[in-house]
Image (cartoon, helix red, strand yellow):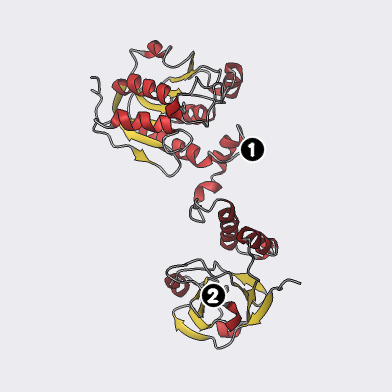
């Protein structure tokens, strides 16, 4: 029979500093976190029957912020009450000591399954989600808890017009929507290379209308998916990936048809349609080296000063060709590439006289 989990009461709590109290960790807990292993402890802590946390909190946060944060550091526990009106000596604390699993992922999932999520604070639920996510993707880090854009109901509604199942590009679409007002302070039309189902184009057209209209949004796409990848594009994409018919895109963007010009064809075949146009914003989302290179070569000389070029694929390991094209193109130009944690890269064009 395997070793079962145990609940052990804490003894010897004493004030440490600020909102932080401390006591010896129960001997059966084993060693806690350390500088070398800052996430070693698997101890879970309960205050009057309610699980508190996050665990592994910085001690200054425990002292200054409280709200149930705690740390099992070395042989001691440092904790704060979930209810700020109470001191820890007014509460009953027990530590849950779980058996060490040879399969760490299984142990994390088992611990998460035992949690009553409804009894946790939003921040602690997020911390548990982060822990489970880390078991499957240990080399990836989730962003900070409490970002307000998740509560932007208008933006979420726009996003969900196009997808209610996959939210992986939610942060990229939000960043795009936030960059557009910067570009729209400058004169010129707007452009997108690589349209897919039209979600980014929808946000762009909506920004144009909000800014008073008077500009065109030019959409360039084969509507037959990607062209053939080269060796430099890696092996993630295939010819025809991301195909979506022009009819579907036009239907998705019907409310902005007075602002939009479609340029159907392979990049760069239809670029000549706008050879005499100046642009304040160009969104490049074509995933591959050659069409990214072609788009940069054509549109950069036609940008107004202060205009933005955004490469949607710049920071993705699945799109090495797009990054190569951006890096090579701007290597001897004055504009630095701003690499966003969303995966996008963008430049602010310094001068409207960019022709070479």
Q: Quadrant of the N terminus?
A: bottom right
Coordinates of residue 107 in the picture (x, y in percent) = 64, 63
> Residue at (46%, 38%) from the top-left corner?
317
> Residue at (40%, 42%) from the top-left corner?
340
From the viewer's side, name the closer residue of 239 and 56: 239
Coordinates of residue 253 in the picture (x, y in percent) = 56, 23
Judged left or right of residue 303, residue 108 is right
Neighbours of disc 1 within 10 Å: few (<14), some (14-19), many (20+):
few
Name above or below for residue 338 compared with residue 230.
below
Q: Quadrant of the C terminus?
A: top left
* Residue on which the image places disc 2: 84
Q: Quick check: can you spot residue 284?
A: no
Label 2 secondary element: loop
Coordinates of residue 45 in the picture (x, y in percent) = 60, 74
Report, in whole angstroms, how far the alpha carbon at label 2 lies from the one at label 1.
39 Å
Q: Earlier in the sequence, mark 2 or mark 1?
A: 2
Q: Residue furthest right?
A: 1
Coordinates of residue 13 in the picture (x, y in percent) = 54, 86
Name above or below for residue 122 compared with residue 277.
below
Judged left or right of residue 351, residue 88 is right
Name above or below for residue 143 compared with residue 337.
below
Name above or below for residue 324 compared with residue 36.
above
From the viewer's side, name the closer residue of 225 and 151: 225
* Residue on which the image places disc 1: 164
């Amino acid at each position: 029979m395997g070793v079962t989990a145990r609940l052990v009461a804490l003894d010897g709590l004493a004030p440490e500093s600020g909102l932080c109290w401390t006591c010896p960790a129960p001997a059966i807990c084993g060693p806690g976190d350390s500088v070398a292993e800052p996430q070693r402890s698997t101890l879970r802590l309960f205050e009057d029957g309610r699980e508190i946390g996050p665990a592994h909190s910085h001690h200054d946060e425990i002292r200054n912020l409280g709200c149930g944060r705690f740390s099992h550091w070395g042989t001691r526990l440092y904790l704060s009450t979930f209810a700020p009106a109470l001191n820890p000596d007014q509460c009953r604390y027990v530590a849950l000591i779980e058996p060490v699993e040879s399969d760490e992922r299984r142990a994390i999932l088992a611990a998460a399954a035992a949690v009553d999520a409804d009894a946790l604070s939003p921040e602690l639920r997020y911390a548990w989600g982060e822990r489970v996510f880390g078991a499957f993707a240990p080399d990836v880090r989730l962003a900070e808890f409490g970002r307000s854009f998740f509560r932007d109901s208008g933006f979420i509604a726009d996003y969900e017009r196009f997808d209610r199942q996959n939210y992986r590009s939610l942060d990229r679409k939000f960043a795009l929507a936030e960059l557009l007002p910067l570009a729209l302070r400058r004169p010129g039309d707007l452009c997108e290379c690589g349209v897919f189902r039209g979600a980014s184009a929808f946000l762009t057209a909506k920004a144009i209308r909000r800014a008073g209209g008077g500009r065109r949004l030019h959409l360039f796409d084969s509507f037959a998916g990607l062209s053939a990848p080269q060796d430099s594009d890696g092996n993630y994409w295939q010819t025809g990936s991301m195909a979506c018919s022009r009819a579907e895109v036009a239907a998705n963007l019907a409310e902005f048809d007075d602002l939009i010009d479609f340029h159907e064809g392979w990049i760069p075949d239809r670029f000549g349609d706008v050879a005499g146009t100046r642009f304040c914003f160009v969104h490049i989302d074509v995933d591959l080296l050659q069409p990214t290179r072609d788009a940069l070569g054509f549109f950069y000389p036609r940008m107004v000063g202060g205009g933005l070029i955004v490469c949607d694929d710049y920071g993705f390991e699945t799109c090495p060709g797009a990054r190569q094209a951006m890096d090579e193109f701007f290597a001897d130009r004055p504009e630095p590439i701003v690499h966003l944690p969303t995966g996008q890269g963008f430049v602010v064009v310094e001068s409207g006289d960019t022709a070479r």
